[in-house]
Image (cartoon, rainbow, N blue to C red):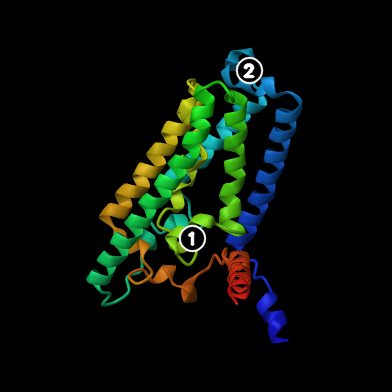
Amino acid sequence: MKAEQEAKIEITPVYASYLIKFVIRICIFAAVLVMYLKHREWLGEFMVQPISFGITPIHILWAMFMLLMIRHLFPGRKVSMAILKQKEETYEEVSGYSELELLRFVRGMNIRAWVVMLVWLSFNAVFGGLYLLGVIGDSDLLMLTVFYFLCDYICIIVFCPFQTFIMKNKCCVNCRIYDWGHIMMFTPMLFIKNFFSWSLFFTSIVVTLRWEMVYAQHSERFWEGSNRRLQCAHCQDKTCQIKKKVNAALRLSSGERNH
């Protein structure tokens, strides 16, 4: 009976919306992948085709990406606390929290965040080099971006290597770099010189800079030791349920190998 209770997944409103969006992202990835495999040249042509010549699937994809980032710049109430924690109205101060501990938290998270950025840029520099050498083209980088678009929700719902191996935070709600997802998603677009690609990449920079400015000015909003809303007892999202099971299975597997 206890095992059955532990295995049960609680579907909160936020979690349900994330699961629906995850399915939508899988469908988008599958559709672009089919086009990539069958008519790769179309993707590159669609990226530079003026909208006056007709709306293409890539125009729709661009609009969806832009709306997604605008929503993060101006978040409503029906989104995860992982995003809302940056807002003043969602901050619930923990009485008597230690400012020294907050400083240690900020310093530790900043170091780990820089490690993530270094790893990510090094990884994507390989694709950038291949693109500049002519080994891969615009359509390949677009496919990579759509793959990152899917991976963004894999990291939220199933497994996040950055959380597990580098950041070491408990969940997305407590994640220091949660809103880095867009700049990571659109990193491949930096190498393509057109409006479609650069508008996405530079808008993602705006989203990230806004996040970093709030973090620098109000870091107390990002730590569960100073913000009660980030503590597990007060969590309304519960988007970490599958990830907890995956990480527990990985720890168990690792322990068995060590023995």
Using the image, tell me which numbered label, if any, was put on residue 45. Answer: 2
Kindly check if marks 1 and 2 are in contact, taking CB atoms under 8 A apart as contact: no
**Where residue 241 sits: x, y (%)?**
60, 68
Amino acid type at image mark 2: Glu
Relative to 51, 3 lies left or right: right
Q: Earlier in the sequence, mark 1 or mark 2?
A: 2
Q: Is residue 40 above or below residue 247?
A: above
How much space separates mark 1 and mark 2, taking CA atoms? Answer: 39 Å
User: Is residue 87 in view?
Assistant: no
Is residue 24 visible to us here?
Answer: yes
Residue placed most toward the observer, 142 or 223: 142
> What residue occupies the far front of the structure in this picture?
259
The quarter of the picture where the C terminus appears is: bottom right
Residue 68: % across, % down: 53, 41
Q: Amino acid at mark 1?
A: Phe
Which type of secondary structure does the marked residue at label 1 adopt?
A: helix
Is residue 16 positioned above or below 32 on the image? below
In-front residue for pair 74/182? 182
| Residue linked to disc 1 | 165
Q: Quadrant of the N terminus?
A: bottom right
Residue drawn at (59%, 17%), measured in percent from left and top? Answer: 51
Callout 2 secondary element: helix
